[in-house]
Image (cartoon, rainbow, N blue to C red):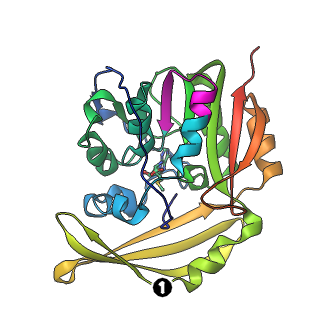
Amino acid sequence: MCGWPRSRSPCSSSGGSRRQVADHREGAHHDAHPGTHPDAHYADERLARVYDAFEGPRDDLDLYMSIAQAVGATSVLDVGCGTGAFALFAQRAGMAAAGIDPAQAMLDVARHKPGGEFVDWFCADSLHPPPVSADFATMTGNVAQVFLTDDAWAATLNALAQRLVPGGHLVFETRRPEARAWEAWARAEPVEHHVPGIGRVRETRTDVVAHPPLVSFAQVYAFPHGEELRSESTLRFRGRDENRAALGAAGFDVLEIRDAPDRPGAEDVYVCQKVIR
Ligand SMILES: C[S@@+](CC[C@H](N)C(=O)[O-])C[C@H]1O[C@@H](n2cnc3c(N)ncnc32)[C@H](O)[C@@H]1O
């Protein structure tokens, strides 16, 4: 979701795959694409440890799960997996799960969660995904917006198309530019959460600068004992025409664009299928 708190409810699941964890710390790749390096929000281990508390319950993931189950997904590649919320949900639901993220600090949180040993975690960015094959790929939490350039977005979609089996599905969400979410960000009050093992942490959003399609902002986290950490981010807002064109060029059919149930009118969830050639 790239930075902002959202309302969610707990995920529940059952079963469990027996895929063993892999530790792929060496796999992080960075290149010249701007916006493909993780922000401090994800890369700093002190901020990665507070991420889940500020995300809240993850009822946004129920839609992804319902689509995965409806299409009979058996293997999930969660791109920009962060602290592993969807990869772990898929694993608990009996699917083989792999999560990739360039932020090692987020992966460290993910792998220590219950079931983390049954997910394959890869420290890698979406432009250079590991050689894993899946029938269902996801980018939850508005990961799609971290790709600032057309080239980075195209490279990500092309890489995912290569990792998906023919007929495999890609599901991701992105904020609708028309909803102008940044206007509410500029007015937002600080938010506080109790983080187990850390204490009360306050997040203040500031310095929102909108030059659509790019919007930059900062988040300042105040920790107990006076420590403050600042993370700066820029997101790209893409509309439906732009996304349809990029997806088509990468070899995806857009089957459906759904309203995000937790943010009606504000976010689109794209349900795509790799074209069978
Ligand atoms: C808002 S978080 C979403 C995390 C997770 N998907 C969720 O729903 O909680 C955005 C994630 O995208 C990751 N990210 C940033 N640049 C990336 C890239 N080039 N490829 C893959 N993931 C990236 C960040 O490290 C971060 O974990």
Q: Is the residue 191 above or below the residue 78 in the image?
A: below
Q: Is the residue 183 above or below the residue 98 in the image?
A: below
Which amino acid is tagged 1? Glu
- The residue lying at 54 percent from left, 37 percent from top is 65
Q: Quadrant of residue 35?
A: bottom right
Residue at the top extreme of this rendering? 277
Residue 158 inside the magenta-drawn segment: no
Quarter that holds the C terminus: top right
Residue 76 inside the magenta-drawn segment: yes
Residue nearer the viewer, 159 or 265? 265
- The residue lying at 60 percent from left, 49 percent from top is 144
Label 1: few (<14), some or many (≥20) within 10 Å?
Answer: few
Q: Quadrant of residue 262?
A: bottom right
Left or right: 63 as drawn, with respect to 270: left
Residue 18: image location, x then y, percent? 31, 20
Residue that carries the numbered disc 1 in the rendered image: 189
Q: Secondary structure at mark 1?
A: loop
- The residue lying at 72 percent from left, 60 percent from top is 176
Residue 213: image location, x then y, percent? 71, 65
Read off the magenta span.
Answer: 67-78
Q: Is mark 1 within 8 Å of ligand 1?
A: no
- The residue lying at 51 percent from left, 50 percent from top is 36
Query: Is any atom of residue 58 visible in this view?
Result: yes
Left or right: 158 as drawn, with respect to 134: right
Query: Is any atom of residue 152 visible in this view?
Result: no
Residue 72: image location, x then y, percent? 59, 22
Q: Is the residue 231 above or below the residue 202 in the image?
A: above
Residue at the right extreme of this rendering? 241
